[in-house]
Amino acid sequence: MTQDNKKGVDIIAKYFPSLSDRQKAQFEAFDALYRDWNSKINVISRKDIDNLYERHILHSLAIACFWGELKTGTRVLDMGTGGGFPGIPLAVLYPEVKFHLIDRIGKKIKVCNEVSRSLGLDNITTQHGDIGECHDKYDYIVSRAVMSLDALVALIRKNISPKNVNTWPNGLVCLKGASLDDEISRVKLPVSEFGLNEYFNEDFFNSKALVYVKV
C-alpha cells in the first residue's frame, strides 16, 4: 500500500471503523483503478483526482451515515452514476445490498463495469440509458447533484417500491451543495436536509448537504 493509498483508506476507516480486511483492500484499490481510467476517460476532474478519497469516496459514503444498517436484499438505483459515484463505494460498504447504476454516457458505464469487476463486486448491475428506460422498483434512489430536486423527484417516483423494509421509508437520497431552500420549496413531498458536517469533520463538507425525499 502506498502512503497516499494508506492515507485515503485511513480517512474512510476513521468514520467506518468496522470495515473488513476485504473492504479495506477494495477501497485501497480505488486509487490505481480510477487513475488508470481517468487517463483514458475523464470520469473525475483531473484537478480533483488527488482528492479521490475525501471528495468522491467519503462524500458518497455520507449516504451510509444517513441510512445506517440496511436489510439484506435492499435494492438501490444510482441515477446518473457517472464513473460510479455514489454507487460503487456504497456497494463496497453494503455487500448484501443490490445496486443498479444507470447513466446515459456509455463510456462511463464501461468504467463502472470494469471497476466493479476489478473490485470483485457481485452486487452491482449497470444500464446504459435514460431513467425513462428503467422500469424496475427500488427501495432507494441515490444521486450526486444530477439535476434540480423537483425535476429528479418527478422522474424517479415511478421507480420507488411501495414496500418499506428499512428504518428510513423508501425514497430519494441526494448529495447536494448548500443553499437548497429554493429547490426544496418546489418539491411537494416531505423533504429532510442534513449538513454533511454532521457526519464528517473535514472542511470540504461544510458546504455540502444530503437531502432525503420520502416518496
Image (cartoon, grey):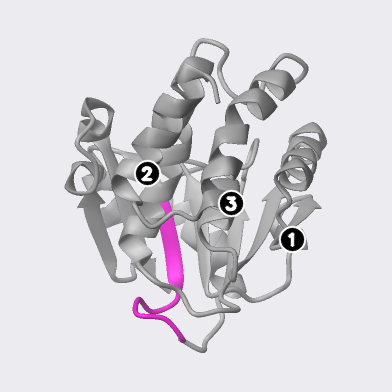
CA–CA distance between discs 3 and 2?
Answer: 13 Å
**Which of the two labelled residues, at mark 2 and mark 1, occupies the earlier sequence position?**
2
**What amino acid is at disc 2?**
Ala
Circle 1 residue:
122
**What amino acid is at disc 3?**
Arg
> Between tags 3 and 1, which lies in front?
3
Whole-percent x and y of residue 93?
50, 56
Which secondary structure lies at badge 2? helix
Circle 2 residue:
13
Magenta span of residues:
165-174
CA–CA distance between discs 3 and 1?
Answer: 14 Å
Give the residue drawn at x 64%, y 37%.
82
Q: Residues within 10 Å of mark 1 (few under 14, many from 20)?
A: some
Is residue 132 located in the magenta-colored stretch of the structure?
Answer: no
Asked if disc 3 and disc 2 are in contact, CB closer than 8 Å, the reply is no
Q: Which of these two is toward me, 9 or 201? A: 9
Q: In the rendered picture of this protein, how many numbered marks are placed on residues?
A: 3
Left or right: residue 115 compared with residue 194: right
Whole-percent x and y of residue 170?
45, 76
Q: Quadrant of the C terminus?
A: bottom left
Whole-percent x and y of residue 62?
36, 49
Please tell me the numbered disc located at residue 22. Answer: 3
Left or right: residue 36 compared with residue 174: right
**What amino acid is at disc 1?**
Asp
Q: Which of these two is toward me, 140 or 56? A: 56
Left or right: residue 10 compared with residue 160: left
Q: Is there any visible trace of residue 85 in the rendered image?
A: no
**Which of the two labelled residues, at mark 3 and mark 1, occupies the earlier sequence position?**
3
